[in-house]
Amino acid sequence: MRWLLYCGCYLCGMNTPSLSARDRAAVWHPFTPQLPVQDAVALVRGEGALLFGEDGRSYIDATASWWVNLHGHAHPYIAQKIAVQLVTLEHAIFSGFTHEPAVELAERLLGRLPHMSKVFYSDDGSTAVEVALKMALQYWHNKGTPRTKIVAFENAYHGDTFGAMSAGARNVFSRAFGPLLFEVVHIPVPLPGSEDASLNALTEALDEHTAAFIAEPLIQGAGGMIMYEAEALSRIYQRCKDKGIPVIADEVMTGFGRTGTWFASDQCTVKPDMICLSKGLTGGFMPLGVTLCTEEIHAAFLTSDRTRTFFHGHSYTANATACAAALASFDLMEEAHTQQQIHTLAHFQQAQTRRLKNHRAVMQARCKGTIAAFELRSTESTSYLNPISERVHPFFLERGVILRPLGNIIYVLPPYCITTKQLEQVYAALEEFLETC
């Protein structure tokens, strides 16, 4: 009887609490103010570009669930590969042991990024960045010439762990932890028309204390979908190379087709020394991060001196099930159908950006690859806390669309499987919102 009372069984005449109500009582959500209390939308299943709520409504996932979902929710091919792996080898210690999914995934990543030499596994995008930063710092330590200075772009976001926060911009995300972050020199992003200023600032920042330069190539994600050109980034990379300073490309968001090519780095004539990947790596199914490095970086750790070992690892490093998901996503990425989906989505996004760029409510519209962003005019400054953002999420939810703005910047970044009809619904809602501004 106790169980019946607890569950609110119909036989007892009680109502079962909704999933949203149970969530409100027990869960603390990320990036979510705790007052005023707002119920989370309870989701019960997903299919393709749609998510379905416990209220029976469907929602178009126009942000690919924080940019992770490439091929659609509950994709049967990835799910089947995960199921097989779960009853074969779900996970095993990765220090001193290995397994087929991790080895094959590393081989396939290196096949797509042939200028890289080794793959180091971690858990997510932020930890992939932590690995790269630590790898760069220890690279100099192992060479006997310790360096500690990191150079990054203004407005950057690289994650929420301490090293990643340090590399990012000093803003609302990291304000509470400011005194504990290590110093990083931030230079202007090489936006069109300001490439020389950015390069000059980099030249001034690079010195005998600089350990690495880190950037989100071509698109700064959480910083506001700021976009710039591969040629400008290649010049910056080359300046670092001329000084012998390692370059870290944070491709956590830009990897796996988002900029129109497999990786944003593919568009650069000068290649980075380390690349961080996560988000779309597993097709949005499971957490997994990787950091790739060149042979030159790895060579600094080739020593019998055990004190120069890279002492970094996670309990779930190279989780076999996550690697199986990544391999399945890789299979789908290599299909001609997926490449056509990416091309079609990029074409649609470009067309919509051109169409809406002169709308009276739009200050700037920009597009790169499959990502479109619309910076709205506002009496407030462009920032994550811009009050426009409080209106966006509920407005679009009412119209069956999931969009989470970056302050006054609304972006559309859906799974590649989204249909033209669904995209038209997203943009119809966007135009309706613009008319309210």
Image (cartoon, rainbow, N blue to C red):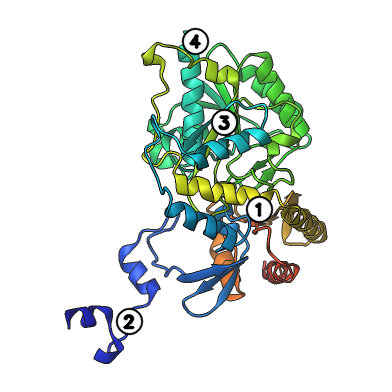
For the N terminus, give its image quadrant. bottom left
**Number of other residues with Cα within 10 Å of mark 1, as a class: few under 14, some 14 to 19, many 20 or more:** some
C-alpha span from label 1 to label 3: 22 Å
Q: Residue at label 1?
A: 332
Amino acid found under the numbered disc labelled 4: Lys
In front of the other: 144 or 336: 336
**Which tag is nearer the camera, tag 4 or tag 1?**
1
Q: Position of residue 2 (x, y in %)?
A: 17, 80
Q: Residue at label 2?
A: 16
**Number of other residues with Cα within 10 Å of mark 2, as a class: few under 14, some 14 to 19, many 20 or more:** some
SS for callout 4? loop
Identify the residue shown where x is 66% and y is 34%: 111
Disc number placed over residue 227 in the picture, else none: none
Disc number placed over residue 292 in the picture, else none: 3
Q: Residue at label 4?
A: 143
Say whether marks 1 and 2 touch (CB < 8 Å).
no
C-alpha span from label 4 to label 2: 63 Å
For the C terminus, give its image quadrant. bottom right
Residue 91 versus residue 310 in the image, above or below: below
Identify the residue shown where x is 78% and y is 57%: 353
